[in-house]
């Protein structure tokens, strides 16, 4: 499709929700209206796309949601879209509603879905990185990451207060699935004594060396990424094996990290990425994700976005420095 043929854009949020998704929707709506484009929201991600669950979106309504966490379009994980039959039904919905382009806000699973969809659908797709995990190539930060880290830090600071009062070791599990970005960033931010992440194989050995003879009135904080190969419970049992005298507790922050109002950084990122998604489509670009690298807007093909994730070299160096 030629760029001049785009008159109707549809957008949806998919996968895990993240603070900043609503702000991105507002940025998309405002930019679409300025370009005289019709904008339709698809509710509940790929599930809503298959079912044709659609609503008209306007910037005046969306600006009331821009400061709120979660996603006003709802989100879901869709097993039906994994099948060819499900994708064919989604294509029929887009054709019936005369949609000319599709924007998806989500993470790697969302963009893998678009890659599979592109095999039967020739509409231009554009992605906006919305995931607290910060595990996508093509952008320095994903929507929701900064807010999730701020939430984690605020809660870990409170845990330190009670840990200091009781001279306890606390294992605090943060989110991040297969990515250690939340663990490393929040752990360094609270001056944790140890940080365990999926990308590091030496962090656990160093932790055991620290706690083997631990006998102090100071709190001892261990930040563990949920995707770490050991897990908080196993780490706790190993610590008790080598030092049965310690007073140890486990605290899992869980989904509190997904909620809450987006930070200033996530709000600005949402506005920038949302507006850029519309601009890129009108420039004739497709099947790529908008992102920000070195504070410059950029486009990265979906195939490069979902490549194997790794923590960047600088953070890895800091992790090794402060985990000793």
Image (tube, rainbow, N blue to C red):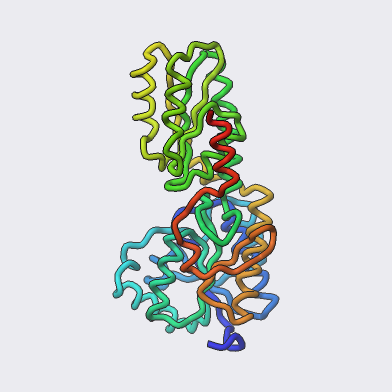
The percent coordinates of residue 154 (x first, y second) are 60, 33
Compared across the picture, whether 13 is left or right of 47 comes to right
Comparing 152 with 137, the one in front is: 137
Determine whether 125 is above or below 27 in the image: below
Q: Residue at x 45, y 61 (%)?
A: 307
Task: Look at 56% across and 32% down and name the residue there.
Answer: 155
Tell whether 17 sits left or right of 62: left
Can residue 64 be seen at all in this image of the molecule? no
The relative height of residue 90 versus residue 137 in the rendered view (above or below) is: below
278 left or right, relative to 83: right
Where residue 306 appears, x then y in whole percent? 46, 62
Return the x and y of residue 289 as percentages of the image width and height. 55, 67
Q: Position of residue 22 (x, y in %)?
A: 59, 58
Taking the image as drawn, is residue 138 in sight?
Answer: yes
Observer-nearest residue: 18 or 225?
A: 225
Q: Is residue 200 above or below residue 251?
A: below
Number of residue marks: 0
| Residue depicted at 41% across the width and 42% down the height | 227
Please name the residue shown 57% across and 51% down the image.
144
Q: Is residue 308 left or right of residue 316?
A: left
**238, 60: nearer the viewer:** 238
């Amino acid at each position: 499709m030629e760029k001049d043929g785009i008159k109707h854009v549809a957008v949806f949020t998919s996968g895990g929700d993240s603070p900043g998704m609503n702000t991105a929707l507002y940025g998309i709506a405002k930019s679409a209206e300025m370009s005289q484009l019709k904008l339709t929201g698809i509710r509940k991600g790929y599930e809503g796309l298959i079912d044709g669950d659609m609503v008209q979106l306007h910037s005046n309504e969306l600006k009331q949601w821009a400061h709120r966490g979660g996603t006003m379009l709802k989100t879901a994980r869709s097993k039906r879209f994994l099948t060819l039959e499900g994708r064919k039904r989604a294509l029929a919905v887009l054709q019936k509603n005369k949609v000319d382009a599709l924007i998806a806000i989500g993470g790697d699973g969302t963009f893998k879905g678009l890659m599979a969809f592109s095999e039967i659908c020739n509409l231009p797709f554009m992605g906006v990185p919305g995931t607290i995990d910060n595990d996508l190539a093509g952008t320095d930060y994903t929507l929701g990451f900064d807010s999730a880290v701020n939430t984690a830090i605020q809660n870990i600071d409170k845990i330190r207060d009670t840990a200091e009062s009781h001279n306890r070791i606390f294992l605090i599990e943060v989110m991040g699935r297969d990515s250690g970005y939340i663990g490393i960033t929040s752990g360094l931010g609270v001056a944790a004594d140890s940080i365990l992440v999926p990308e590091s194989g030496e962090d656990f050995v160093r932790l055991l060396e620290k706690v083997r003879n631990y006998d102090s009135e100071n709190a001892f904080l261990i930040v563990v990424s949920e995707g770490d190969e050991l897990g908080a419970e196993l780490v706790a049992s190993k610590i008790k094996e080598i030092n049965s005298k310690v007073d140890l507790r486990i605290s899992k922050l869980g989904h509190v990290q997904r909620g809450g109002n987006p930070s200033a950084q996530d709000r600005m990122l949402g506005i920038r990425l949302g507006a850029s998604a519309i601009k890129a489509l009108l420039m004739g670009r497709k099947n790529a994700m908008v992102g920000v690298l070195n504070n410059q807007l950029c486009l990265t093909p979906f195939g490069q976005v979902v490549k194997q994730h790794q923590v960047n070299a600088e953070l890895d160096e800091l992790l090794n420095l402060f985990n000793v």
